């Protein structure tokens, strides 16, 4: 679960704006209440991804994004999970030992509303047997549950 | 300046992979040495942006990105600065009191290599006199200098 104090701590360090720092001040803003920084949402998504069953050879190394949107904010008390799908896999033209995979990852809250949608290009080391058959559909429990180690049983 | 310990602390929380956590292990990876998580680069960029002279009415509220790339990693000891330019500003079709501005922000290291390039769509409150003439070119000192308060003299 996304804790209010974690939202404020992340914001104090990286995104110190009223709607991420203080409930009362946030009510007067476009968010109408405390909301996590989009970068916090992105970072929590990355943690869920690293803990998921998506294990490209060489790690999860992002090069860029074809699409990246925050359709709505993450609120205190939200529970996040991911749905990921590998859309494409191809060898790198410039680095013969590397490949590029395109992964769409949607971050959903506890009522299945998308809070982040991204299509990322990841750099992977080529292992033909691993690049083939790379359709994955992942459902990952909340970050809190993961951090308590349940994710290890999924992975 | 980006400190080695900050790279590891961010990674331990949000992106626990060997190339972001441990120098020796990182040497064996695609990065060839310790590198900051791209999400850490993004978060540091946001901090520089919040501390910069870019002050849209209503705050810096990202909706999504037309472009987002990490051409190279941030390394321990790097000093980051931004160059930002407002490319476009238009009223929102669905929310008459809001507008959308498109801002290209390039994050550069101390030898002027881009480490992150993004074109973001930001939601702003409409104030016609502020939306007009919105070309900005910003050069911001390193995060460390900013955190010591020099940025306040720029803002």
Image (cartoon, coloured by chain):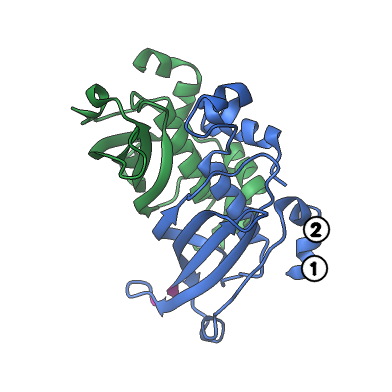
Chain colours: A green, B blue
Query: In the image, residue B111 lies at what x, y percent?
Result: 65, 55
- Residue A115 colored in magenta in the image: no
Instruction: Give the residues in magenta.
Output: B96-100
Q: CA distance from mark 2 to mark 1?
A: 8 Å
Residue corresponding to mark 2: B149
- Residue B99 colored in magenta in the image: yes
- Are callouts 2 and 1 both on one chain? yes
Query: In the image, residue B37 lies at what x, y percent?
Result: 54, 38
* Total marks placed: 2
Q: Residue at position x 37%, y 72% from top?
A: B95
Q: Overall secondary structure of the magenta stretch?
A: strand
Assign a secondary structure to mark 2: loop
Question: Is residue B121 visible from the viewing direction of this image?
Answer: yes
Q: Chain of mark 1?
A: B
Query: In the image, residue B36 lies at what x, y percent?
Result: 58, 39
Assign a secondary structure to mark 1: helix
Residue corresponding to mark 1: B153
Locate residue B14 relative to residue A98 in the image: left or right.
Answer: right
Query: In the image, residue B85 lies at what x, y percent?
Result: 53, 72
Q: What is the quadrant of the C terminus of chain A in the image?
A: top left
Q: Residue at position x 42%, y 45% from top?
A: A63
Answer above or below: position of A146 versus A38: above
Answer above or below: position of B109 versus A56: below
Q: Chain of mark 2?
A: B
Q: Nearer the viewer, residue B109 or B147?
A: B109
Q: Nearer the viewer, residue B30 or A5?
A: B30
Locate residue B120 relative to residue B49 in the image: left or right.
Answer: left
């Amino acid at each position: 679960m996304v804790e209010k104090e974690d939202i404020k701590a992340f914001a104090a360090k990286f995104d110190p704006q009223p709607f991420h720092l203080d409930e009362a001040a946030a009510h007067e803003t476009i968010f109408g209440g405390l909301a996590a920084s989009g970068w916090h949402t992105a970072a929590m998504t990355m943690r869920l991804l690293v803990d998921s069953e998506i294990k490209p050879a060489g790690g999860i190394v992002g090069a860029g994004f074809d699409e990246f949107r925050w359709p709505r904010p993450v609120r205190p008390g939200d529970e996040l999970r991911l749905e990921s799908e590998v859309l494409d896999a191809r060898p790198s033209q410039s680095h013969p030992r590397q490949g590029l995979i395109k992964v769409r990852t949607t971050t959903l809250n506890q009522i299945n509303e998308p809070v982040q949608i991204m299509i990322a290009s990841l750099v992977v080391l080529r292992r033909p047997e691993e690049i083939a058959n790379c359709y994955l559909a992942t459902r990952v429990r909340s970050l809190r549950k993961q951090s308590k180690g349940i994710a290890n049983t999924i992975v």
